[in-house]
Image (cartoon, grey):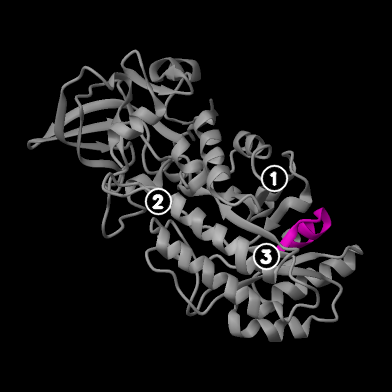
Amino acid sequence: MNLAALVARHGVIDGELGVGGMPLSRLAARIGSTPFFAYDRSLLDARVDLLRRVLPERIELSYAVKANPMAAIVQHLSHRVDRFDIASARELRTALDADLPASRISFAGPGKTLAEIRQAVAAGVLVEVESATELRRVVNAGDELAVMPRVAIRVNPDFAVKGSGMRMSGGPQQFGIDEERVPAVLAQFSASDADIAGFHVFAGSQNLNADVIAASQRRIVDVAAALSEHLPRPLRYLNLGGGFGIPYALRDEDLDLDRVGANLRELVDGPVIRRFPDAAVVVELGRYIVGECGVYVTRVLDRKNSRGRTFLVVDGGMHHHLAASGNLGQVIRRNFPITVGNHIEGAEAETGVDVVGCLCTPLDLLGADVRMPEATVDDLIVIFQSGAYALTASPTAFLGHPEPIEVLV
């Protein structure tokens, strides 16, 4: 990945970055204030179209709402994807307000409260349980509400996935029921009044290695095949997870989606159709769907030099975009792609620039030692790859600054 490719994806209009088909400065004027997040629906549609072309037709595409729960995005995607995955009662309400039926929503995540479980069961969503205790609570909620709850077992398999941004399987985990314990749990609840449809396995997130993702998917199918022998009815739901990564640092390589799709085609046309002819086979993606369609835009308030180093002080920062700042001081910090958006062309580049936010901490660093067009006060700084896990994954209350605006254009 390189910066020129990112700029080309969004487009250049009158020497400025294009967002939603208009120059950045015009969009900023229409919004009326900075900072803001802008999500381009044409890029969002293009990503879904790409997935539809490459993945097997039988694969059902689920959007993980936690990646970006903005209501306009969820509503837009309700006409483009097959399912939603949610992780809280608030996300449940957002999903139910969109145009997908409740039967196409799944609810995953450890620590679901009793109130959340009751709401999910009452709504008729599929509850992906993370423990035997949670399964008991789902069954009890169904009894109290006189509703048969729809359930899938989230499995913690005995293998881990290398190269993921976050490993979510193998060894001790707060996620799911250990693979070896699943048969006993199913036996314990065999007589309960719950519709246990199948399994959910999410092995890891933000992986850019297609071979690793493919190997994980093959092992998930094998795990599901073995565990399906213990289900009271034939398996009807198999969530393979996702974990498809996007490049954040300029040296990152794009995920080879064609390779992932070819592997899935072999799985679906082979062992999956043989073992689970009636199953809905789901791939659950959040970041890969929405991450590359968004930009974060913040305005330069001050340009200053401190002992030979240039600092651009902007009106945004880590309270809006924690990931771009380095997630509270991660050991190896890498810049997100960043540039001056209101004069992409025609400005001389400078090096050694630090883009810093308006908070009272040295952790508020959006770009370190950046090479970018020379910027001055009132210029608009753009951070790419900002469509997922940005605003809602950030400490917005820190120091009491206003929250940024979000727009889908």
Most frequent secondary structure within the magenta stretch: helix
Percent x, y for residue 333? 27, 53
Q: Secondary structure at mark 1?
A: helix
Q: Which mark is residue 203?
A: none
Q: Please give the name of the residue rendered at 37% of the width and 43% of the height, measured from the top-left corner.
A: 318
Splitting the image into 4 quarters, where does residue 238 fall? bottom right
Asked whether residue 169 appears in the rendered view, the answer is yes
In-front residue for pair 24/111: 24
Please give the name of the residue rendered at 44% of the width and 55% of the height, measured from the top-left corner.
Answer: 259
The disc, 2 or 3, on the residue closer to the chain's N-terminal end is 2
Residue 49 horizontal side relative to residue 307, left or right: right
Residue that appears at 53% across and 35% down: 44
Residue range corresponding to the magenta coloring: 117-127
Residue marked by disc 3: 273
Q: Is residue 306 left or right of residue 176?
A: left
- The reply, left or right, for residue 100 in relation to residue 58 is right
Expressed as whole percent of the image width and height from the top left, the position of residue 360 reads: 31, 43
For disc 1, the marked residue is 95
The amino acid type, in three-letter code, at marker 3 is: Ile
Q: Tag on residue 255?
A: 2
